[in-house]
Structures are given as structure tokens and as C-alpha cells.
Amino acid sequence: MRRLAIGRGLVFEFLEPYRTNVMVVLTERHILLCDTFCGPDPVRQLLTLIEEVGVHGRRVVVFNSHHHYDHVWGNCAFVRPAAVCHALCLEYMRATWAQDIRTYAHHMMGHVEFRAPAVVFGDSLHLRRLDVWLWHTPGHTLDSSSCYDPVGRVLFVGDNVESPIPYLTALNTQEYLHTLQTYLDLEWDAMVASHDVPMEDDQLLQRNMEYLTRFAHWDGSLFSGAEETIARHIVNLAEVAAEVVRLRPEGAHEHYATALDAIAERPSLRPDGIHMARLRNVVDALA
Ligand SMILES: [Zn+2]
């Protein structure tokens, strides 16, 4: 695990089972953890490292960017629930908890238990004593929120910004673009996304916006370029398939048909069976 000094605090970079950052904001009396990764063990490990740099006796506050397991499983490292999240995040956490424990058991680090966040917010929340803003930023998921530290000039965006392109879980490209625009409008020196190297510029943010714009137009050029990017785009199409069938947006049928053609040409792009069935279902349903 690597440790980087950023803003008023630190970013801990875990590399297994995949790169994940936990951002820490240090103030005179508090330690704010942005997300808690895959369990209580890495959280205890990073708290020990924080103590080694001479930080003792400060109150820990946890912020969860969204309900996915790799962002919340370490919440139970604390006896008293100290977590803060968006109201939808708590709702989704409850709804998906048991299934995620079964599906991702092999990623669990330490003994994971459900511990409901103590505070939920709606549009935004100013943590006055820490001088940090949390606000609802739907994008990667509908419950996603972000953390802005105007003192350290650092922005934590969870999974809303990701390379090469973000994962979509809803057909919410316009709302997602609006969220990314709010990131552009803020003044920051560092942007921390959960699964990328911390950034000092907005290049990836711009590239993610370009992807979402092309997605919104069902742009066929999304099937050319790097294979990793096309494969992830196909996963995104599968994730939003049910909504596409319901809403029947113009241009979607042709785009899904092109996806099936691309997969037929390049078998290495082929998604898993469930995703493949969803893609076929869209093509059949909208024919
Ligand atoms: Zn994640």
C-alpha cells in the first residue's frame, strides 16, 4: 500500500484486489475517511499509519461515496457508527448488502458486518467543524456523492471519474454530465477518484464527459478504438439494457445491433452470459 500527501491529508492507495484509493482529510480534531474499501483490516492498517505520523486522539468521521461494497465494507472497523452518506446510499446499502457479501466474499478483508451510517443527507451537507462539503452527485450510481475540501483544494469523486471510461449503472447520461460539469466548475489542485492515480488536471474528467456525450447520442464510433474501452462500453450497454427496453430511446436499437456485430467480429469482446442475453433482448425488443 502506498501513501501520498494530498491537500490537508493523505491518500492511501491499495492495489489488491484492484487499485482503490481511500482519501483521508486531517483537521485539528478530526480524521475524515472518504470510503472504507473492502473491510475493517485495511482501515485499521491505515489508521495505524496515521498514528505513526503523530496524529492521535482525533475523532474519525467516515464518508461513503456510494453503496458499492468496495467503498463501504470497512465501515464496521468502528464500534460506534460514524458514517455519513446520501440517503439513497443507505437505502441501496441495505438492499444489496446480503447479495454483495455472497458475490464478493473473496474480496473481503477482515470480518465484515453491516453497520448503518449514522447520518444521511439529501442535496448536500457542510461538515462545519471540518470545513468540508459533501454533496449528491449522481453518475456512476444514482446514490453517488462527492467530497470537496476547499481548504486543501482537493476533490474526491468516488467512481464518478474512471479510466478509460466510467461504469454506468443507469441510463442517466445527462444527469451524469451535469455532475462532471460541477467538478469542472470547482477550484481544486488534486482530484481523487477511487480507482485511478490521483490527478492534478482535468484530462480524464474531460475524456469521461466526451464518452458520456457520445453515449447519449448512441454514437457508433464507440465501437472503434482500444479493446478495453469497447469491452467496458459493452458492459455499460448491458447494465442499462432494461431501461433502454422500457424507454425505447431513438438510435438505441441500431447501437445495440452494432454491439452484437462488434462482438461477432471480435469474440474477445464477448461479455458474460447474463450481459450477452441482455444485449440480445434489447435488439429483439426494439426490432
Ligand atoms: Zn468502486
Image: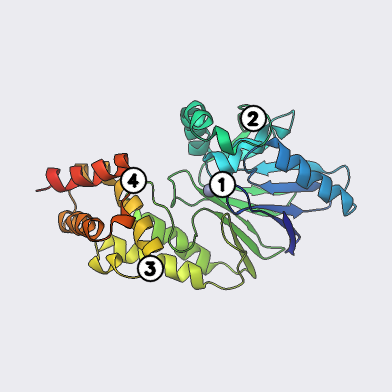
Q: Residues within 10 Å of mark 3 (few under 14, many from 20)?
A: few
Residue 10 appears in the picture as rendered = no
Residue type indicated by callout 4 = Glu
Separation of residues labelled 2 and 4 (CA atoms): 27 Å
- The answer to whether mark 2 and mark 1 are in CB contact below 8 A is no
Residue designated by label 4:
239
Label 2, label 1: how far apart the Cα atoms are: 18 Å
Amino acid under label 1? Ser
Q: Residue sitting at 27 percent across and 45 percent down? A: 276
Which is in the foreground here, disc 4 or disc 1? 4
Alpha carbon separation for disc pair 4 and 3: 20 Å
Q: Which mark is residue 112?
A: 2
Provide residue 50's location: percent of width, then percent of height.
82, 50
Of labels 4 and 3, earlier in sequence is 3
To which residue does mark 1 refer?
65
Q: For ligand 1, tell me if the residue under mark 3 lies within 8 Å.
A: no
- Dot 1 falls on a residue whose secondary structure is loop
